[in-house]
Amino acid sequence: MQNPIIAALDVPTAEQALKLAHEIAPVVGAFKIGKELFTSAGPDIVRRVRDTGAAVFLDLKFHDIPNTVAHAVAAAVRLDVQMLTVHTSGGRAMMQAAEQAAQATVQASGRAAPLVLGVTVLTSHDAGSLAEIGCEPNVGQQVERLARLAVQSGLRGLVCSPLELAALRRMLPAAVQLVTPGIRTGTEKADDQKRTLTPRAAMAAGASWLVIGRPIYAATNPRLAADAILASLA
Ligand code: C5P
């Protein structure tokens, strides 16, 4: 089994990120670099994390006109990331352009195209806030609608909450990869995640990858915490 743990490097500086990355690289499958770290440390942080030998998930959630997103995806691919995110609400043409740019940019390099993951409905939304921006207020229905559109547009993966896993697995082709945050082991404090599953339960519900932040980076010993999560999946 490939190691499905994606450790979120949700720390503000390159120094903190690299210390953590070197410590846990042997026991995780990939690192997630998000908006805070990328904005403060720059693209060089991607290269330096890649130097640990681990895969990188660049979570910048692109959402713009197709041409702009295609160029941003191409730039991310040139940084040699293995996964990246776009907002599915950017629409069919934008997602097609993103996937096409990912495929075209790796062609000369011989590398595999990175997984372009679609983000459906942010978990910070509820019926009221969706209605306010003119969307279908039923969160589950909106997630399913965007997930279907993402797959029709050629995306090979989606980010989804643990509680959406079962419904998406039922309706999507089995090859679609589902990447799931909101993972808690039950031993740490709840933080701000309200809808969580344990690593084992999320895998059983159909997750392909688990995004895990605080349960690893905020642990007294991140290496031991990641080790224990991996062992819980065996
Ligand atoms: O610390 P924690 O395990 O909650 O971190 C989860 C990571 O997944 C964070 O980087 C967070 O931004 C991201 N995420 C999330 N919920 C979503 C989408 C992304 O927690 N719906």
Image: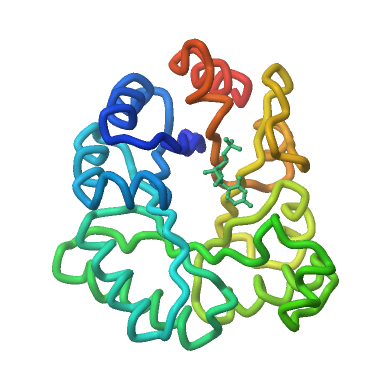
Q: How many marks?
A: 0
Placement of 27 over or under 131, stated as above or below: above
Q: Position of residue 51 (x, y in %)?
A: 19, 36
Is residue 217 shown left or right of residue 114? Answer: right
Answer left or right for 19 relative to 151. Answer: left
Quarter of the figure with residue 75: bottom left
Give the image location of residue 221, x and y in percent: 47, 11
Quarter of the rendering containing residue 102: bottom left
Which of 110/69 is in front?
69
Identify the residue at horizontal 55%, vertical 35% (top origin).
212
Ligand 1 location (quadrant): top right
Measured from the top left, where is residue 9 in percent x and y? 41, 36
User: Residue shown at 68%/67% (left/top)?
Assistant: 172
Residue appearing at x 68%, y 30% in the figure: 184
Location of residue 14 with respect to 121 vertically, above or below: above
Percent x, y of residue 160: 65, 55
Colouring of the image:
rainbow
* Quadrant where the image shows the C terminus: top right
In the rendered view, tell whether residue 104 sits above or below residue 52.
below
Horizontal side, residue 16 vs residue 51: left or right: right
Residue at the image point whose x is 63% and y is 46% from the top: 207
In the displayed structure, 22 sits above or below 203; it is above
Q: Outermost residue toward the left?
A: 108
Q: Nearer the viewer, residue 142 or 158?
A: 142
